[in-house]
Image (cartoon, rainbow, N blue to C red):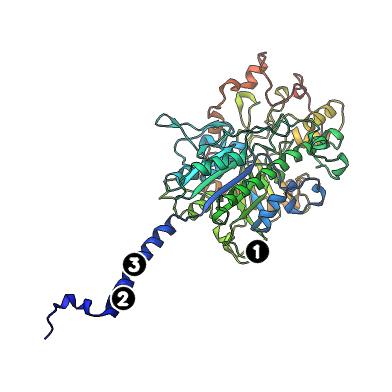
Amino acid sequence: MNRFPAHLEIRKSPILIFTFLSLVLLICTFSVFAQYTQTKKPNILFCIADDASLEHISAYGFNHTAWVKTPTFDKIAQQGLLFMNAYTPNAKCSPSRACILTGRNPWQLEAAANHNSYFPAKFTTFMEALGKNGYDVGFTGKGWTPGNPGAVQGQRRQLTGKEYKDVKLTPPTKQMGVTNYPGNFEAFLKERNNEKPFAFWFGSWEPHRDYEYGSGTEKGRKKISDINKVPPFWIDNDSTRNDMLDYAFELEYFDRNLQKMLDVLEKNGELENTIIVVTSDNGMPFPRVKGHVYAYDNHLPLAIMWKGHIANPGRKVNDLVSFIDFTPTFLEIAGLTNASAKMEPVQGKSLLQLIKAKSSDKASRSNDHVLLGRERTDVGRPHDEGYPVRAIVKGNFFYARNYEPDRWPCGDPETGYMDTDGSPTKTSILNANRAGLFPNIWGLSFGKHPAELLYDLTNDPYCINNLAQLPKYLKIKNALRTQMERELKQQQDPRMLGNGSIFDKYPYAQQPVLNYYDRFMNGENIPAGWILPTDFEKKGFVPPKF
């Protein structure tokens, strides 16, 4: 007869004891592993140049821009993905960044569709969402700006996380910023909670203007003769070429800092678990580019590296993608939904399917077009009105609709064409026009344009030859306009719903230049700011025929 109670019989069997202890150990191990994996969500490093065009990133292989070298961007593309058709919906600093941060198109962002606006309180950014859901978040350099981000409970909103700016350096030129980007990134990593993933925004101030004239040749060791092609909407002279080389010098400075950011990641053991995204907010700060709506303005560089998660690194992705796709990508990586992140509905689509695809075939998201737009990018028109445009890129065609073609696209001549940054290139065009030279170039960069524009990007990548009025292209033009405006209505674009004037009524965040045009025309002596004294035309200016 067994003297032990049934529930104590386990003590009599070493095999049962071993089995029981193994099961306990397995359960504990699984529990610890589950907790560990929950803290090992991927880090996010978002790197954005300020005013850099796609043609000047050497990974894209343009022979006529071999005078610019970006080896770090190229390495990220080689070890990750190079996106061939990435577009910002708005080619101006703060609207472009607002699209990135919210996953919404500019016409869905109320005041944030405008440059230098008050950021609406209703829109949460992906950096804010990540910060509330287990991520340490921060930024260095240029975040969302210019504009007023607003406040929450008396505290200034941190749209791109906590700012890190205390680490300084002596820059290569006096016109560059003193922010030590990798040094501030290092400070962030030392301060953060190592048990949590992080999201960090590296916003280079370069190659934004101003430039130190001649720095490209003197410090960048470049030659005027290195440039074998100047875009057809600028004057090909030494002044313009020097300007382009100065821009290249600053772009290469961004690329060198990008390498240092990777070095900091590797030093801290985080390179393997970080998705790295590198892009620009809009095209270069030259006439007819930054702030406008053409392929050269909105079509931007994009490379993504994520070790261990990209099949066949070095692939080129030909799919059309929009900057509104970044937010849903980062939310998915973090295991968040739009609802759990408590964000307004996101218009973009996650890029993860493209990232994890095994080939460059377009078997991914079936996107065959992107939408672009513009409202008030800068002041310089009566009552600070904008220049509203909507556009669609589909196939090899670029269609744009100017909804106020009687307005000056670059700002009124008497106020210095304020929608184009002051530069030697700009001054060359304006001075030549005053001398009766190159009226077509002046017209392309500063003149008024018809309501509809249509370009064949295959044969006309610089968008010079408008096909909109040719009977041969009538069917294509009408189809693109119909599709574009139908989708804009679905997205509740106020301009499609009879309320487009709302964008001109949103207040400008920098009050001292509010109503610049009206005050200037009334004789007030207002500093030009980012435009040059030579940019102003006399009252009664008569534009040339072009």
Q: Measured along the vertical axis of the image, is residue 174 above or below residue 236?
A: above
Q: Position of residue 317 (x, y in %)?
A: 65, 59
Using the image, tell me which numbered label, if any, was put on residue 360: 1
Alpha carbon distance from label 2 to label 3: 14 Å
Q: Are marks 2 and 1 in contact (CB under 8 Å)?
A: no
Mark 2 or 3, closer to the camera: 2
Quarter of the image containing the C terminus? top right
Mark 2 or 1, closer to the camera: 2
Q: Is residue 106 visible?
A: no
In the picture provided, is 254 more to the left or to the right than 102?
Answer: right
Q: Are marks 3 and 1 in contact (CB under 8 Å)?
A: no
Q: Amino acid at mark 3?
A: Ile
The residue that label 3 is drawn on is 27
Q: Which of pointers 3 and 1 lies earlier in the amino acid sequence?
A: 3
Q: Amino acid at mark 1?
A: Ser
Circle 2 Cα neighbour tier, 10 Å, few/some/many (<14 / 14–19 / ≥20): few
Q: Nearer the viewer, residue 441 or 291?
A: 291
Q: Position of residue 49 (x, y in %)?
A: 65, 42
The residue that label 2 is drawn on is 18
Mark 3 or 1, closer to the camera: 3
Q: Position of residue 495 (x, y in %)?
A: 56, 39
Q: Position of residue 525 (x, y in %)?
A: 67, 14
Using the image, tell me which numbered label, if any, was put on residue 78: none
Residue 147 sits in which quadrant? top right
Q: Nearer the viewer, residue 488 or 474?
A: 488
Q: Regarding mark 1 in the picture, which secondary structure is present there?
A: loop
